[in-house]
Amino acid sequence: MKKGKIIFWAIFFVLTPFIGNCAETGKFQYEDFKQPKRCGACHSEIYQEWRQCLMSQSFTHEWDQIEYFKLALPHALKLEKVSGVKAGCVACHGPLAFLSGDIPPKPAEAGTRANEGVSCEICHNITGSTEKEPFNFSFTIEPDRVKQGSRADAKSPSHEVKYSEFTRSPELCATCHDEQSPYGAWVKETYREWKAGPYANKGTRCQDCHMYHSPGKSAHGGKDRADLAHHSFHGSHFSGKLAGAVDLALYAKKTEISPGSTLTLRAELFNGKAGHHIPSGATEERMLWLEVQAVDADGKSYQIPVNRKDFEGEEYTIADSGAMAYQAMGEIMEIKGFKGVKRDGNCPDGARIFRRPFFDPQKRMTICQWYTADNTLVDYRIGPMETKIENYTWAIPENIAPGPVTIKASLFYSQVPSSVGEFLELPADEYAPILVNTTTLILEVK
């Protein structure tokens, strides 16, 4: 190895202490990678699917723009411990910029090639990983005329094709979907959740659920395939994927109730569709919560809070409108006297929240994953093939209207707490609650 290269790597690891073995920034130029529209000339349907999925928007997506330019980048410039995120965030959200050394890249409105996000030339030029269990963009990449693919018999007049077992593997996804913070906390573990769960043992891969398969051709003039992989990559940002992701049932021991009496309810939630926890990925900000509400014959509604189970850290899993959090945002943005925002957004008090809270070095709850020192206090998400049971005790009001009363359980999801979305002025659809499932019981008040 040449002396200059040794010096480069020494400097690189000092600046990015949490990265480990990974793709090299500045090793290539933008021109080394073909633009996606060129691929789309032959792979038109795949290109159309990619254009509409978040892979193509991994850099331009508004929340990612705000998180990087308002929070991560300023923080990286102020605090040496997290300086690596200046480039590290871009490695997976704007990989062409990272590989080309365009760090920090310009915001999306500048129209640079960082805007191409995770393009064809990224996934189909990745040759492997430096890690057995990849994380923190530990991919190796060789942009050239040889494209890595999942077909041993594929041929193209435009480029060479090489069969790659790595392209077919969950390890490809893990290079960006698992991440360790500069403080050593695992802040994304979707691959590791899958590997430790039942789906890995059955051989069900990420690609089997997030890339739909059907008969078709991958390119004009290509072979007919029985199992063409669609590049839709639907996940939690797609409401159709979320709908019904968790089964929900509600039970009561009585069908008739009386004013002044007590009703016990049981809600059962089953994750039978996802090969990882729900929520997964950037769980420092993603919220899944269950609301249980009764509506009497006069239309009056009553919020029914969940019964406590008294496990360690449970206070972070029950909505509390008085709890404040995310103070680091204000510090990064240099807002004097910032006391944080509501930890649970607009969740009604007493709702059960299925989450894994992240804590910064000051032991405050944070949405800044790069500033996460610990997230092991409590993990109350729903694992693959896991059932959560929540119990409720409702003291029925003396003045409740006689007649039918509807008990409704509703499971909601949002990408970020509404309080964070409002504070950072995100578009409303970035934090609006999405209905995952709902069920009702109708009882009679006598």
Image: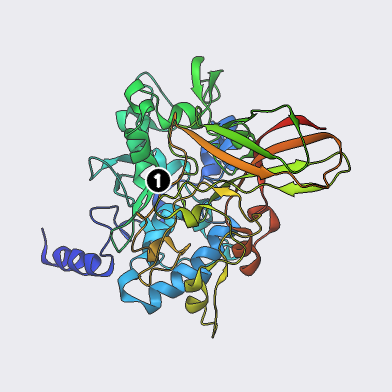
Q: Residue at x 69, y 28 (%)?
A: 254
Q: Residue at x 49, y 57 (%)?
A: 315
Instruction: Name the side, left or right, on which 328 lies relative to 266.
Output: left
Residue 157 in view, yes or no: no
Closer to the camera in the image, 414 or 2: 414
Closer to the camera in the image, 152 or 336: 336
To which residue does mark 1 refer? 177
Give the answer, above or below, for where 422 lies relative to 79: above
Closer to the camera in the image, 213 or 225: 213
Q: Secondary structure at mark 1?
A: helix
Q: Residue furthest right?
A: 298
Residue 337, percent from left and from top? 54, 84
Residue 393, percent from left and from top? 62, 42
Q: Residue at x 42, y 60 (%)?
A: 369
Instruction: Name the side, left or right, on which 269 lies relative to 418.
Output: left
Circle 1: is it few (<14), some (14-19), or many (20+) Cα within 10 Å?
many
Q: Residue furthest bottom?
A: 336
Total numbered labels placed on residues in the image: 1
Residue 36, percent from left and from top? 52, 43
Closer to the camera in the image, 298 or 209: 298
Residue 307, percent from left and from top? 55, 46
